[in-house]
Amino acid sequence: MAILFATAPFNGLREAIYSSRSRVFELPFMDNPHPASALAQHATRLAFLIAGFSGAAWAPIIPYVKLRCGLTDAHLGLLLLFLGMGSIVAMPLAGSLAGRFGCRWIIAVATLAVCCSLPVLSSSDVMPLLAVALTFLGAGVGSIDCVVNVQAVIVERACQKTMMSGFHGLFSVGGLLGAIGVSSLLSLGFSPLQASFVVVVLLLLSACLALPGLLTGRIHSETGPAFALPQGIVLTIGVMCFIVFLAEGAAIDWSAVFLTTVRHVEVRYTGLGYVAFASTMTIGRLLGDRLVRHIPGRMLVTGGSLLAALGMLLVAGVPVWQITLLGYALVGAGCANVVPVLYSAVGRQTFMPEHLAVSAITTLGYSGILAGPAALGFVAQSANLPFALGSVGVLLVFVMVMGLMLPQALINGETPK
């Protein structure tokens, strides 16, 4: 008994220490933040920044892979197909897991997949290994893009104000930083492998800061399917996103190659095409929330699509590299707010549950940015690269037509009755 009384204070102290340790470790990583909280909003912005940065950091490395492996346009397109395959397979799974478990750990695992893939892509010349690494990169980038849009729809609705363009603006900021940062490192004499390690460190640090504010736990009811094909208005929006993302994919994956092989720009400066595209897209999206409040969504979609079509036709048709950069800038400005307006419309539609709808249109849409460039490679091999890029400009005109067909209440920011 004496021993028990003597050790009681120490037992109490030990329990207090363990309890405090538990609270310290649980608060940032176990608690589910309220969607309208400042923590959730900041984490959503940072996650979009991570998504844009991780995808764009790969773009300036593509010409080095092409030269290192001696690839033709068709072979490069076939290799890029693995990027799209990984993403398209992963996105429906990521959307389903986000519905069941929340967004936090899916984004964490996807970021790790990106970090493991980039060094391999930056150094290897073994085609099977490059294919596997691209598959993992596509799965990681696609999962982040899908899940962060699920979080964005929930946060925007909880805050009851227009935020989607600003979120996607941070995606563009990340893309701009990734393209400029990696291009700058390469121009300073860094090897692609060294540049990729810098990217990995920045991604890991950013992910650690974002995790506490990402949503966790079930975000839909127990009933209902885990997967669903897009239908009704969701299918129309998904096709529109596919074409707009195809234009983005053409800028990300083919602008550097186009400037090198067609416009004969020095390889270390070929990241400028994506920089021109990402700069105008970033400015447009950062101003987008204000534009959406004053300009009808239909006008932003139709007018933006036409401007992007004009820009892509300038890229393909005018054989002057300065005009090519201007064309990419117009594509970025035109596409800037088309996708954010469409994602907000998905959050208002009632045809499908939000996590399934977002997962469906993200899968369909991002197949344009990931699998689309592979198809452009085959078109370029059959005809030429300017023709392949010009065809994207024609498709953007169809986005304008489909924008005119969307219900006015849905696209202009009203919830259908």
Image: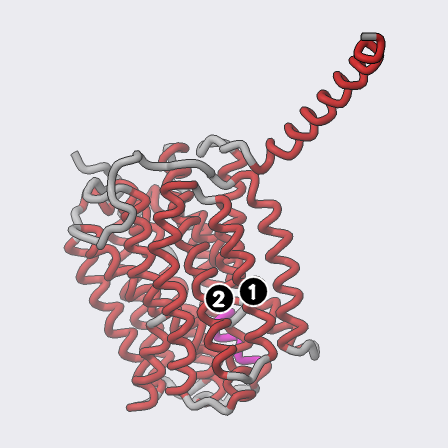
**Residue 111 shows which numbered tag?**
none
As measured in the structure, the alpha-carbon distance from the residue carrying label 2 to the one carrying label 1 is: 15 Å
Quadrant in the picture for residue 145: bottom left
Q: In this view, does 89 lie above or below 207?
A: below
Say which residue label 1 marks: 178
Mark 2: few, some, or many residues within 10 Å (few <14, many ≥20)? many
> Do labels 2 and 1 touch, CB within 8 Å?
no
**Location of residue 316 (image quadrant):** bottom left
Q: Earlier in the sequence, mark 2 or mark 1?
A: 2
Which region is colored magenta?
A: 269-275
Percent across and percent down for residue 255 are: 45, 77
Q: Residues within 10 Å of mark 1 (few under 14, many from 20)?
A: many
Q: What residue type is labelled 1?
A: Gly
Specify whether 66 is left or right of 8.
Answer: left
Residue 400 locus on image (x, y percent): 22, 62
The amino acid at mark 2 is: Leu
Question: Which image quarter holds the C terminus?
Answer: top left
Main SS of the magenta part reads: helix
Residue matched to label 2: 137
Q: From this view, report whether residue 10 is shown above or below residue 26.
A: above
Label 2: state its secondary structure: helix
Foreground disc of the pair 2, 1: 2
* Residue depicted at x 50% and y 37%: 40
Q: Is mark 1 on a helix, strand or loop?
A: helix
The answer to whether residue 272 is magenta is yes
Q: Report if residue 358 is visible in the image.
A: yes
